[in-house]
């Protein structure tokens, strides 16, 4: 908090003074809580100018292309760290030492199995159910299996819930895919690391031992890491708002998954593949680029630019390097859709129209290319996003529950009918 104050002049009323809070970095924040006592609310659709909470987890400066997790730049974490180490950082505030990391990794490794009765839940879904629909239901149902640690006021219970969610979400995600294609569920393999284990559960069969390429496992790990947290986005805000009611963590994460399912949030990399399929052939690229430049045409190139990042997406550079490594490993440089993607990437980086408008390829563009190359169907793209984002959700939930919080209650600008008297149906 600073000594600075903001003053609001409302015609016909006395001036209202508000304290100004100063964060570690970023813009100052005007505390308007006292405004309700004067009979006024602020109006901010989409909460684009409203800080609903205080947090120490993630900082974003969209104008400068900065993303920090507990102060560490995302490019350093993606290059030097791994997903589970980043999970520890987000949960605990500091990077682990060697012993702490080994203990954390082992804890996650030995909690990847799910209760056998959960298998029966899947039979209640149609085989063609969207995997995100399954995830919403099954993750929410975890509270029925792990009700021994649902006291959210107990720090140890919150820690156990966080570990269980990080460990079991990949297992449930792979199960949702296996169920949709009619293959048997594959149990986790404790000899594999987190991301290799996920690929094993996704693509392995009981008939033969999985052979996981280290290059592909590393790519999967980076996708998880680069999606681990992104400040107060729609799904994270949903988890916080749900958690403010005192709901159990599994219900809160299920709510986050539901919010992520929206095409304006978690469906961006899926939209990239749909766009590539719509273009269909390299010969049509110029046609679609011209459509994207035409303001009167509703067509938009997906995976370029970002609502938050006005300069460049700091996650995209690392993801581009990973995409190149994956395509080389799999020998897919000649895949028709991926050739379209590479050509679009070149245009976006060189064409003055895209450069001037700063419509650079973002993390969704490259992650869509990688997931396509790995053979993961588009219906699973958002599920994989949810796997990576689970640690961000549970970190924000735990931060909120650990501190002073109150139930979320946004206000509204009411524009409906004023009070009126009921009229009996025969008199209407």
Image: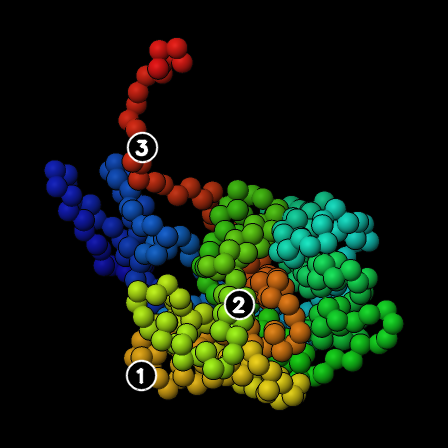
Local secondary structure at mark 2: helix
Q: Earlier in the sequence, mark 3 or mark 2?
A: 2
Local secondary structure at mark 1: helix
Of 98 and 110, the residue lying toward us = 110
Horizontally, residue 220 falls left or right of residue 29, namely right
How many residues crowd mark 2 within 10 Å: few (<14), some (14–19), many (20+)?
some
Q: Earlier in the sequence, mark 2 or mark 1?
A: 2
Residue 160 seen anywhere in this rendered image of the structure? no
Q: Which residue is mark 2?
A: 274
Residue 44 seen anywhere in this rendered image of the structure? yes
Q: Which mark is residue 352?
A: 1
Of 253 and 379, the residue lying toward us = 379
How many residues crowd mark 1 within 10 Å: few (<14), some (14–19), many (20+)?
few
Horizontally, residue 98 falls left or right of residue 233, namely right
Tally of numbered discs: 3
How many residues crowd mark 3 within 10 Å: few (<14), some (14–19), many (20+)?
few
Q: Nearer the viewer, mark 3 or mark 2?
A: 2
Q: Position of residue 62 (x, y in %)?
A: 37, 70
Q: Earlier in the sequence, mark 1 or mark 3?
A: 1
Q: Which residue is mark 3?
A: 416
**As drawn, 206 above or below 135:** below
């Amino acid at each position: 908090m600073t000594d600075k104050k903001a003053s609001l002049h409302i015609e016909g009323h006395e001036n209202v003074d508000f304290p100004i809070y100063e964060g570690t970095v970023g813009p100052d924040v005007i505390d308007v809580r006292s405004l309700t006592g004067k009979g006024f609310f602020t109006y901010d659709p989409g909460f684009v100018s409203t800080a609903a909470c205080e947090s120490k987890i993630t900082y974003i400066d969209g104008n400068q292309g900065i993303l920090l997790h507990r102060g560490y730049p995302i490019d350093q974490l993606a290059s030097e760290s791994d997903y589970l180490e980043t999970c520890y950082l987000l949960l605990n505030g500091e990077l682990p030492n060697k012993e702490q990391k080994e203990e954390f990794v082992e804890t996650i490794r030995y909690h990847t199995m799910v209760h056998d009765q959960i298998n029966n839940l899947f039979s209640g879904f149609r085989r063609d159910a969207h995997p995100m629909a399954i995830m919403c239901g099954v993750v929410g149902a975890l509270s029925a299996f792990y009700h021994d640690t649902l006291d959210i006021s107990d720090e140890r219970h919150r820690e156990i819930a966080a570990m269980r969610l990080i460990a079991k979400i990949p297992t449930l995600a792979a199960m949702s895919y296996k169920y949709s294609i009619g293959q048997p569920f594959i149990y986790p393999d404790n000899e594999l690391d987190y991301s290799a284990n996920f690929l094993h559960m996704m693509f392995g069969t009981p008939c033969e031992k999985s052979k996981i390429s280290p290059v592909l496992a590393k790519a999967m790990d980076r996708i998880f890491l680069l999606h681990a947290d992104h400040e107060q986005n729609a799904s994270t805000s949903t988890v916080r708002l749900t958690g403010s009611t005192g709901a159990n963590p599994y219900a809160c994460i299920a709510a986050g998954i539901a919010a992520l399912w929206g095409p304006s949030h978690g469906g961006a990399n899926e939209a990239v593949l749909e766009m590539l399929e719509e273009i269909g052939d390299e010969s049509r690229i110029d046609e679609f680029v011209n459509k994207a430049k035409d303001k009167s045409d509703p067509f938009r190139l997906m995976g370029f630019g970002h609502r938050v990042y006005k300069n460049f997406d700091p996650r995209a550079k690392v993801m581009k390097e990973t995409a190149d490594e994956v395509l080389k490993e799999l020998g897919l440089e000649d895949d028709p859709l991926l050739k379209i993607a590479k050509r679009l990437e070149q245009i976006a980086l060189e064409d003055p129209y895209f450069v001037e408008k700063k419509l650079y390829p973002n993390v969704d563009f490259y992650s869509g290319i990688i997931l396509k190359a790995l053979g993961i169907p588009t219906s699973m793209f958002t599920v994989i996003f949810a796997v990576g984002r689970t640690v961000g959700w549970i970190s924000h939930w735990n931060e909120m529950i650990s501190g002073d919080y109150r139930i979320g209650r946004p206000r509204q600008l009411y524009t409906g009918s004023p009070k009126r008297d009921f009229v009996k149906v025969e008199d209407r």
